[in-house]
Amino acid sequence: MKAKSALSLALAAGFAGTAMASSPTTLSPTNGNVIDAAHIYFNIATGEKVVTVINDGETIGAGLADSFPLWSSLVPNQCAELGYTTSWFFGVDNNSGTTSLATDITNLDFGDIALDTVVDMVHIDWVTAHDDTDTDSDGIGDGVPGLGGEWTYWDADNGRAPDRSTRLPLISFMLIDLPGNIFGAGALTGYTADIDLVGTFTTSLSFEIGDSDGDPQGAAFAHTDVDGNGPIATQDRNFDGVLDSDLDGDGLFDWAWSVRFAQPGTRDLDNDGNIDGDLADSMRTIGISFGAGEGTAIDNGDGTWTWDLDTAMPGATGQEDAFAIYAPPVNGEILHAGFFWFGGFECSSAPLPNGPGYTPGASFEHALYGPGGVADDCQADINGDGSLNFFDISEFLALFAAQDPQADFDGNGAWNFFDISEFLAAFAAGCP
């Protein structure tokens, strides 16, 4: 693992808010020669950066040992078990004129989560065709000047459209000089990153989603008192008789995350009075990968397919087969452009020789982590019931077989004998 200077941070304010439309519009996902380059651990509270090059055989960065998956959409190919070997991505920002999308588009994905969820780290990704250099030959781009991404997290949001009275931003951060494509013309380079939000007790950007009791549970940001009327989960701010926190009426808290990319030569990302980067570098695609929670593709036998979430897996909570797109901001307000999907998830078409072939669900790679799950002083209690028995061993073996981060006991990104040995030692030591 190597420290890296590329990738900088610029904090940004949340956007103005916006409501669920009826039928989503069908879009086409993007296909290309995507080569995964590296995983980045970046602590935005302390500035620490650690890069793990994928070809080194390590797939996760530092930080995950102290955080537990709360909401996870990290399965890249929902049809892999049926013989599909490649995955789609979605070109969020393409200023080349070859697609209907253009620069400054905001892509918003939404879903459900438990109330009072504290988040201390998030997982993001990007796929880019912006040419970059690798002057130190460490397997990661040096950073493309002016290429940035802004990620924002929202309370009480199910992709709201015209009604701006319910959605509330929690935090927003912008990463600038993102690493770009290092594999030559025609290729796209993929990066994943775990963004740690906590440095010390006084330097924390952790946030609580869906506060229900006015207690932020140690998080630095939460909507514990909305307009002087109490926590976000109790509000009906548009007086429509429906809680803002359950706009789709499924009994779970609605939340969302959004990403908006900045192209080189278009914005002053570091606020120094100068436009960052060269406009000539802006005619490239940058986007995000598809993802899903742990589960299984089910053929319903009637021409439709279902992704059956495995709710026993950590982080396998509500995801929806739709997302929202917003046009560039006008006077600080993002304008709802509609709801979109890819025609409905299915694995029935034959795999293509040079492409995925299947239709992905309209959910994107993302994850939230928090200070929950297995306590450090009883790490072998895998199922978290406070006792050590056969069920912990059985669940560990299942997680180990699935190469789940929770079974990576030594935290090196590989699953081997050493993880089994450490688990057995922790199991033998017992719980306090």
Image: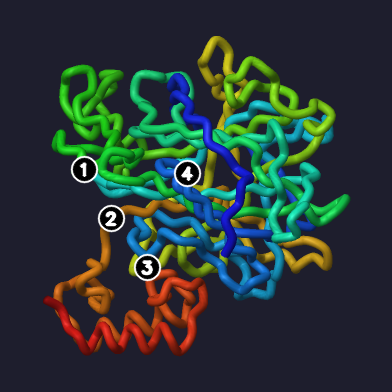
- Please give the name of the residue rendered at 51% of the width and 16% of the height, measured from the top-left corner: 333
Taking depth in this image into account, of 181 and 8 the one nearest to the observer is: 8
Type of amino acid at the residue the image marks with label 4: Gly
For marks 3 and 2, give the one nearer the viewer: 2
Tell me the crowding category of disc 4: few under 14, some 14 to 19, or many 20 or more residues within 10 angstroms, Cα based: few
Asked if residue 70 is positioned above or below residue 28 in the image, the reply reads below
What element does badge 3 sit on? Answer: loop
- Please give the name of the residue rendered at 45% of the width and 47% of the height, measured from the top-left corner: 43
Type of amino acid at the residue the image marks with label 2: Pro
The reply to whether dot 3 and dot 2 touch (C-beta < 8 Å) is: no
Give the spatial CA distance, label 4 vs label 2: 20 Å
Q: Which residue is mark 1?
A: 218
N-terminal of the pair, mark 3 or mark 2, is 3
Choose top left, top right, bottom left or bottom right for residue 65: bottom left
Q: Is residue 427 visible?
A: yes
| Colouring rule applied to residues | rainbow
What element does badge 2 sit on? Answer: loop
What element does badge 4 sit on? Answer: loop
Give the spatial CA distance, label 4 vs label 1: 22 Å
- Tell me residue 138's x, y (percent): 70, 60
Q: Which residue is mark 2?
A: 371
Q: Which residue is mark 4?
A: 47
* Image mark for residue 313: 3
Type of amino acid at the residue the image marks with label 1: Gly
Tell me the crowding category of disc 1: few under 14, some 14 to 19, or many 20 or more residues within 10 angstroms, Cα based: few
